[in-house]
Amino acid sequence: MNRVLSVYLDLWRVVAALIVFIYHFSSGDKFQKALLSRELGLESGRVSHLAVVIFFVLSGYLIARSADKPSLKWQRYFSDRLGRMYSVLIPAVILDIVVMLALKQLNPQVWSALSGGDALLPFKYFTTLAFLHQIWSLNAVSWLLGPAWSVGYEFWYYAGLGLRQFLPGRRMKWLGCGVLLPFVGPKIALLAGAWLTGVAAYHFSKKPPPLPRPAVAGLFLLSLAATILPLVFSRHLPCAHGSADKLIGLSSNFLTDTVYSLAVALNVWSLSVWAPSAAWLENPAGRAGKTVVGYLAGISFSLYLFHRPLIALMGAIFGTMENIPQQLAAMAGVFAIVALLAEFTERKLAFWKRGTDWLFFRAIPGLTRSWACRRRVPVEGGAPAPAPLK
């Protein structure tokens, strides 16, 4: 991947995470007034959803790129994917539990408003950690961990790509994906198109561009406008208001989401094949900008999952912010806490991957060998078991 594209993708990860953060902080829902979000034009819930669609496209592109290695083993693929997701998801569930316990003591009214007395919370935590919280008509996720709905989609997209790549033979590949679809249900399947546009953008980027370089540069600018304008004018976009208790819930806008994802994927593809000069990254300002963007992108997943419990805790302690400077100060405080927590989550990815490596490289093979040995144990009076292969 060329350096300009790498910085560009990191920048979009940061922008998408900040959009979700700002929307949830000042959307006028439960804790804070819609002050900053109104000034920035982000008060529509549609803009937050489009930011998640951007995440889907970027995820599809990056995962397809990381999986495109002839020597890659299925254990490494799934260990890396699971380690990455659990590095933030497990701490997010723990944070949610801690915040809920704190709210019960600090502000029982807020705790009750957040369904603190919900007897299904343990079940919701389990389904979230098992990535089952969005299958079929389920929306079994804690209110404060609402953004984790997208994790319940992405995990199964990772799984589908893994089955498609590592199962032997074309028939087995199609059979594996065919079994996966009825298991996860229509809700997850309908938004798969948005993720797959990112996968397609990567695979098309490996081929010679069908257009001359100036035309590709022009296409990049047009697709960039097509990516930004829907975010700016999101309140005016057609929107099917799906609810969590319906069969397709948060996938209600899958048609417009898929169209939007095509614009984002085209933007990523055009930049990847245009490959503009990276010389500007070598000057002091360029290096500083790359460092800042890289750091923010490196904690964007933590910001995405941690911000809502922290916003609730801050709202319960300090109350509603009355003006934009107060909101900015409070947001800076939440961001600082997220940055601190990220030092123990995705910025310590090697630690989390040691656990998933143990699962895929030791525990699962050990169970497989144990099961194979049991099958070779002779029945009394029968033929002796075949000798194990050396």
Image: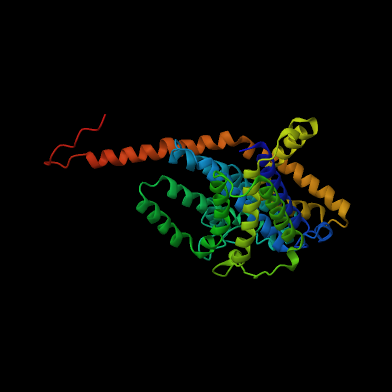
* Image quadrant where residue 246 sits: bottom right
Question: In front here: 75 or 25?
Answer: 75
Residue 131 visible in the displayed image: yes
Residue 118 drawn above or below residue 281: below
- Residue 27 in the image, given as x and y percentages of width and height: 76, 61
- Residue 303 in the image, given as x and y percentages of width and height: 69, 47
Q: Is residue 20 left or right of residue 366?
A: right
Taking the view exactly as shown, the residue that stands out farthest to the front is 212
* Image quadrant where residue 283 sits: top right
The scheme the figure's colours follow is: rainbow
Taking the view exactly as shown, the residue that stands out farthest to the left is 381
Question: In front here: 48 or 356?
Answer: 48
Residue 299 drawn above or below residue 265: above
Quarter of the image with the C terminus is: top left
* Image quadrant where residue 118 sits: bottom right
Q: Is residue 316 left or right of residue 101?
A: right
Q: In the rendered picture of this protein, how many numbered marks are placed on residues?
A: 0
Question: In front here: 155 or 286?
Answer: 286
- Residue 203 in the image, given as x and y percentages of width and height: 53, 47
Quarter of the image with the N terminus is: top right
- For image coordinates 51% across by 37% down, the residue present is 355
- Residue 215 in the image, given as x and y percentages of width and height: 67, 50
Residue 125 visible in the displayed image: no
